[in-house]
Structure formats: C-alpha cells, structure tokens
C-alpha cells in the first residue's frame, strides 16, 4: 500500500496550489500545479511499468 499512499500524498500536496491558482488566480501557483502534474505523470508511468513487470514475472 506504500504506492497508494505515495499517490495520495502527491495529490493532496497539490490541493493548496490548485485552490490558489483557480480560485485566487495566483500565477506562481499555476507553475507549481504544472510541476506537480508532471511529477504525477512520472509517478503514474513508473507505477504502470512496475505493475506490468510484476505481472509478467508472475508476481
């Protein structure tokens, strides 16, 4: 479950910046949102590869 917790932490960490960007129109928060979304994409890609490798190895 460590992977799930890491995902939840990544998403939760973006909450404040999403609010600042979309609600308060803070441009600097938009930069942090984009960075966070890139980190999320990398995490998703790595996790997807790990799951595929584990499945192919027969777990």
Image: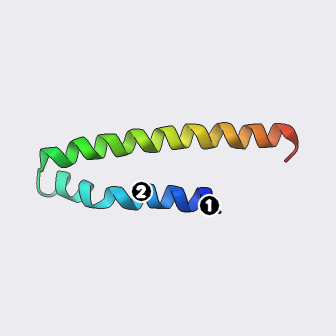
For the N terminus, the quadrant is: bottom right
Instruction: Name which quarter of the figure residue 51 lies in.
Output: top right
- Give coordinates of residue 6: x percent, y percent: 53, 57
Q: Is residue 33 left or right of residue 2?
A: left
**Which x, y percent locates residue 15?**
31, 60
**Residue located 22% across and 59% down the image:** 19
Using the rendered view, name the quadrant where residue 56 is placed. Answer: top right
Q: Which mark is residue 35?
A: none
* Residue 43 placement (x, y as % from top left): 52, 43
**Element class at badge 1:** helix
Q: What residue is pinned by disc 1?
A: 2
Q: Is residue 3 left or right of residue 56?
A: left
The nearer-to-camera label among 1 and 2 is: 1
Residue 27, position in %: x, y?
13, 44
Q: Residue at the spot x=43%, y=42% of the render?
A: 39
Q: Name the residue located 59 percent from the left edge and 39 percent from the top edge.
A: 46
Q: Considering the numbered disc 2 on the image, is that residue within a helix, a strand or a loop?
A: helix
Mark earlier in primary sequence (1, 2): 1
Residue at 26% in and 61% down:
16
Q: Residues within 10 Å of mark 2 (few under 14, many from 20)?
A: few
Q: Which residue is mark 2?
A: 11
């Amino acid at each position: 479950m460590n992977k799930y917790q890491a995902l939840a932490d990544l998403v939760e960490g973006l909450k404040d910046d999403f609010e600042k960007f979309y609600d308060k129109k803070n441009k600097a928060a938009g930069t942090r949102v984009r960075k966070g979304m890139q980190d999320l994409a990398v995490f998703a890609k790595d996790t997807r590869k790990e799951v595929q490798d584990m499945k192919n190895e027969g777990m």
